[in-house]
């Protein structure tokens, strides 16, 4: 694990992890909110925090509505590391 701070940031919030997990494909905040059952305002705050940590990117920042967000290369790498650690943890518990 290269960046434990980013790992900790994602996994310490269930809602943040749900949002981060859902961004394998470009999605709008409304799509994420409907899929995950999380308040749209909270989704926006989570997206801002993920952008500030350079884990996701907005694909069309010039748009005022229907902005699309997706994990970037750094975020995708972190997602793979988190998934791997979770798989290892689940395998040990069985």
Image: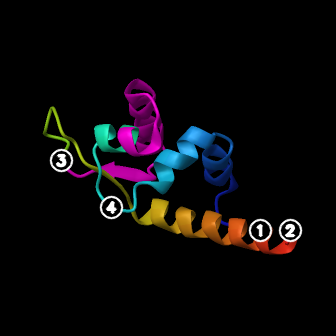
Instruction: State the CA–CA distance, disc 3 to disc 4.
Output: 14 Å
For disc 3, the marked residue is 60
In this view, the residue in front, 22 or 56, is 22
Tell me residue 89's x, y (percent). 79, 67
Report helix, strand or loop for mark 4: loop
Q: Which residues are magenta?
A: 34-60
For disc 1, the marked residue is 90
Judged left or right of residue 60, residue 75 is: right
In this view, the residue in front, 93 or 19, is 93
Instruction: State the CA–CA distance, disc 2 to disc 1.
Output: 5 Å
Instruction: State the CA–CA distance, disc 1 to disc 4.
Output: 25 Å
Farthest-out residue, left: 63
Lower sequence index among marks 4 and 2: 4
Lower sequence index among marks 3 and 4: 4
For disc 2, the marked residue is 93
Report helix, strand or loop for mark 1: helix
């Amino acid at each position: 694990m290269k960046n434990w701070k980013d790992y900790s940031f994602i996994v310490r919030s269930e809602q943040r992890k749900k949002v981060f997990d859902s961004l394998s494909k470009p999605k709008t905040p409304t799509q994420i909110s409907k899929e995950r059952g999380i308040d749209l305002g909270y989704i926006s705050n989570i997206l801002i925090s993920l952008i500030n940590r350079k884990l996701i990117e907005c694909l069309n920042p010039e748009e005022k509505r229907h902005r699309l967000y997706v994990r970037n290369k750094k975020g995708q790498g972190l997602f793979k590391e988190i998934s791997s650690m979770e798989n290892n943890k689940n395998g040990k518990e069985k």
